[in-house]
Image (cartoon, rainbow, N blue to C red):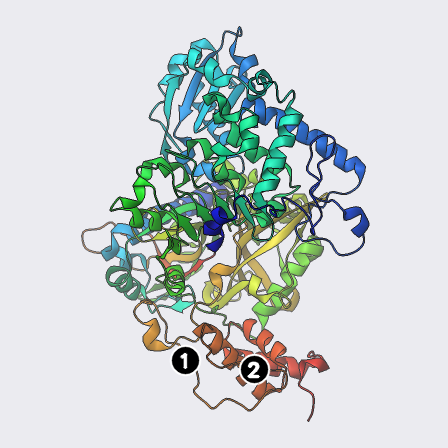
Amino acid sequence: MAPPTEDTLTKVSTDAANEFVQSFYPALENNRNTIASFYNQPTAMILFNGNAVADGAAVQEIFVNQMSPTHYEVQSFDCQIVNQTYPTPTSTGLKLPTETGLKDMSILVLVSGYVRFGESRDLPQRGFSETFLLVPNPSSDGPKGRRRKDWLIQTQNFRLVV
Amino acid sequence: MKNGKGSRGRQGTSDRGGIRKRGAATRVDREGDLMMDAGSARNRGGKKARGESGRSGTTSRTQAANKAMDAIQRAISSNSDSQANIRQSGRGSGLEQVMVRGWKQSKAASNRDGGLESLIAFLEKKLSTPDSKAGTRARITKSRVEGDALIVSIRPELLDRMLQLSGFSFAGAPLSVHKFDRSANDLLDQPMLSSLSQNGTSPSAADTKAKMTAVLGRRYAQQTKLLDLSRLGSDPDLLSMGIFGSTSTESKFFPALMKVWELNFDNAAARREAVESVSLADNQLANITAVTTLAQTIPELKNLDLSNNDFKDPQALIGWRWKFRNLEFLDLSNTPFSSDPTFKDTMLKWYPKLRFLNNVEVRTVEELAAQKKTPIPVQAPHFRDESQIAENFVRAFFAGYDNDRSELLNGVYDKHSTFTLNVNTSAPRAQQTEPAPWDAYIKKSRNLLKINHLPARMSRAYNGADKIRELWTSLPATRHPDITAHPNEWLIECYPIPGLPDPSGQSSTGVGGLLIMVHGKFDEISGTKVETRSFDRTFILGPGGGMGGIRVINDILCLRAYGGHEAWAVENQPAVPQAAAPAAPLAAPVAAPPAAALPGAVPGAPDGYGMPVPGKPDAQVQQEQLVLQMSSKTRMTLQYSEMALTGNGWNIDVALKNFEELKTQGTLPPDAFLPGP
């Protein structure tokens, strides 16, 4: 099989990042019971302002039970391919490069925007920067009744920067 | 706060020295230019007076004066610093005039120019038919500001289209667009100048300006940083100028006065320094329309006295809703609005730092501090390095990026490395900063929100050291702060990640590496101009053939307006668990401050250092205690101990480890240690 062209790689990676950004932040705002479905299991590391969170379920628990309504505004984001042939774990061991397809890439995403903690528009807009590493979804089926996500969060680092 | 109230008491005293330096009497030069630097010739080479405008030498003074004259002419004759004067633009040119309101409530209103440039660009874009070619794009060549309205002149055929823009949203605020009434225009537009000439007192703009300067000088108390603009209507000097003879001069008066005030400062910093308090008490104001320019001229105001005016409701003050972000004291006593049941809540919402309203404390210092807290407490950076690879990389990277980018690329980038940059042009910014333009970067910016076409996404990605070099040599020179000397200006986090590509092909199932996230700032030097910007930059390092056996796999950079570094200052280190719990849902397990007995007196420790003292924040006490512990364990001075702790996110274990490493390397200077054995 011929290696994928630069066009295809760019399209697949940027579309993936776009879909992720456009669905993850809305979920943090008002679809919090779906938050865990964005995370791989296990995750490598999840940090919010330097606080480590165990996994996607813990992130969801925090947002559902402890966070006031929060408004995110993504103002800029970009992505890069990290590994075109990410070794996704399968039932028979790690996927080898020869077994991978186009959607087996891992993707680095950097997001910049502002967040408002609380409902009032009068509250301050805090600038944030967030780094994600997305990896291919190892499972073949999605959560019940929802479309399967092709990529999941392996690592996430949120920081208020303004 | 006492300044605001005290203002009225001071009225009429003779010692209100005016705008002056170091006690020198106010002097006004031939052209009516206030000489802020009176006496600076004597002082040149010596200490500079605080807030000195920096002007010196007659040449620059004359130039500045000429510039000032142009500006004041414009301010007085057109009520704005836009170029067009309605008297020339409106008549006989066959143009239609349209009044645009609502933009002062937009987010763009906080721009350097009050949002005018983007508003005009917005209108031009909306006026241009989608199929019009570049050459036939609708233009707004004449415009001016009148209160909260922008009055623009357009070709008659654009009028219908223009009026349809009413209700369109501009930067988050709905616009209202109406045809400008020509007869009303003529009345309003009577320039102050000619009106003053009719009174036979002020033959020229220079004369008007000189008089206004004198009025301002009389009403400014440098020591208390108070600009007292109360009871303007009964000011004999203003009355003699005929300012309040007609509504037209009255409406132009305050903007002109503000313009004259601005002209007395050479730079925004000196202007900010000069005033903390303004009184507009006793001015019979029904709303702030006439004085709204105060928010542009003195945006960092702390104390504002608006008492004894006629504001009826929040609508009367709405134009200042997003302004005065540092306001701590606000007096609206004796205004109908202050008996409104929503009064207090509204003002608290509008002004996040407000502490006193109508002389009553409405927020304590503690409440203010609690308000700043985020639901996610800010912790020290998570930095989990391997054999100091990340630390060495970050130090070498930013020094190399500033000094020799090509060398840096040779060292740790290879033909598989990827670099992209994106610009967040609308990022929140630190207060008191003005955004620098992005021209040098914007054509390379790969903000995927805006760059939607595949070819553009491809051409803005730089793969391989050679392509990256081509880009980097075209980007402006930078200067990042020294990491060791200014650790608090940086936030660096790092941890190992698996699953990276191995270009050597030895491991087909991926290799481990490091994810490094850096937030900070840099200065950009182009010619004589220095712009400060903030950035977020994420790297992925993997094993490779570069220096130190590593290579950069990914380097992704986000540029944004300078946003300071307060956001990552650790909020509640080391948090007392029960105190932090309610406000801190995400509180990670944090070691409680060791309750170990404090070491004995440390040489050089000030009295009460490390001890709780009324008024000293808990966080500071805890930090001081950590510094004392660090010092007792390392025998380093308090200063070096504190540096070691701040450099390691106030984690004493990490700091001690770091100390041992530095000590082994012998890089600590002798004066880092306390004298004695």
Q: Evaluate whether residue A133 shows in this view.
A: yes
Horizontally, residue B507 falls left or right of residue B658, namely left
The kind of residue on which mark 2 rests is: Asp
Q: Nearer the viewer, residue B9 or B519?
A: B9
**Residue B607 got which mark?**
2
Q: In x, y percent, where is residue B662? A: 64, 79
Percent x, y for residue B652? 51, 80
Q: Is residue A26 above or below residue B374?
A: above
Kindly indicate the quadrant of the structure image that contains residue B141: top right
Q: Residues within 10 Å of mark 1 (few under 14, many from 20)?
A: few
The label number, if any, that marks residue B591 in the structure image? 1
Q: Specify few, some or many for label 2: CA neighbours under 10 Å numbering under 14, 14-19, or 20 or more.
A: few
* Residue B416 locus on image (x, y percent): 57, 54
- Going 67% across and 53% down the picture, which residue do you hit? B50
Indicate the secondary structure of the residue bearing disc 2. Answer: loop
The amino acid type found where label 1 is placed reads: Ala
Side of A84 where B481 appears, left or right: right
